[in-house]
Image (spheres, helix red, strand yellow):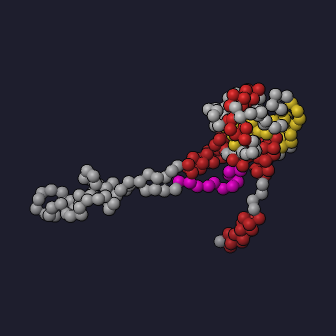
Amino acid sequence: MAIVDVYNMKREKVGQLELADEVFAGEIKEHLFWEVVKAQLASRRQGTAAAKERAAVSGSTKKLYKQKGTGQARHGSKRAPNFVGGGQAHPPRPRDWSYRPPRQVRVGALRSALSKFAKEGRLVVVERFELPEIKTKGLVQALSTLKAERKTLVVDAASNENLKLSIRNSKDHNFLPPEGVNVYDLLRHDTLVLSKDAAKALEQRCLREPSAASSNQAADKAPQAAKG
């Protein structure tokens, strides 16, 4: 088990927390970062680019002039791509760019990112992230006390309203609940601050086994693969 120091809001050590080595002290597989971040950014693409082909452009369908005898090119329609105002040849179409890497890849990348923060000393675990009032200045001061002045991702329960509302006006710092933590947001921050409960929730999320249904499906497919 990985042993992590736990601090209060004054950065005074108040205890230690045992976390799974697989999640916070595992091997850092950086190639998985590329796989998962690429998928995340692809899923954010709107995919709404579109243009009209010649069949969709308004205009006459009448042949411009007779086929032979004019000495000109054999045009058939004013809506052809080589005319001004004509349709585009092979135009872009709306499409869905999103895709989902395998679960082992996604979880492996998340474990590697958390281990990277822990090994590089950029992980801070606090007993409870408590703010007396909703105030961005108070949040910045609290993060400064925790030695997290640079771009910081704070992870705590979604019910922590003072934290959520205080951090939303900050340019450099962001908040996520444990269930929303992802590789892209982790890698674009310098420091990760976790509440004690959030750290355990992330641990459980990364150690969670696939559902029994998916396991049964895999078992059903195994004999078929063997026969093939």
State which region is magenta. Answer: 97-107
Outermost residue toward the front? 133
| Image position, residue 221 (x, y; %) | 69, 69
| Image position, residue 224 (x, y; %) | 68, 72
Outermost residue toward the left? 69
State the residue in front, 215 or 4: 4
Residue 219, by quadrant, is: bottom right
Q: Is residue 161 magenta?
A: no
Q: Is residue 101 magenta?
A: yes
| Image position, residue 85 (x, y; %) | 27, 52
Residue 88, by quadrant, is: bottom left
Residue 132 sits above or below residue 200 on the image: above
Can you say which quadrant of the picture contains the N terminus? top right
State the residue in front, 116 or 42: 42
Residue sitting at x 86%, y 30%? 13
Residue 160, by quadrant, is: top right
Residue 52 visible somewhere in the drawing: yes
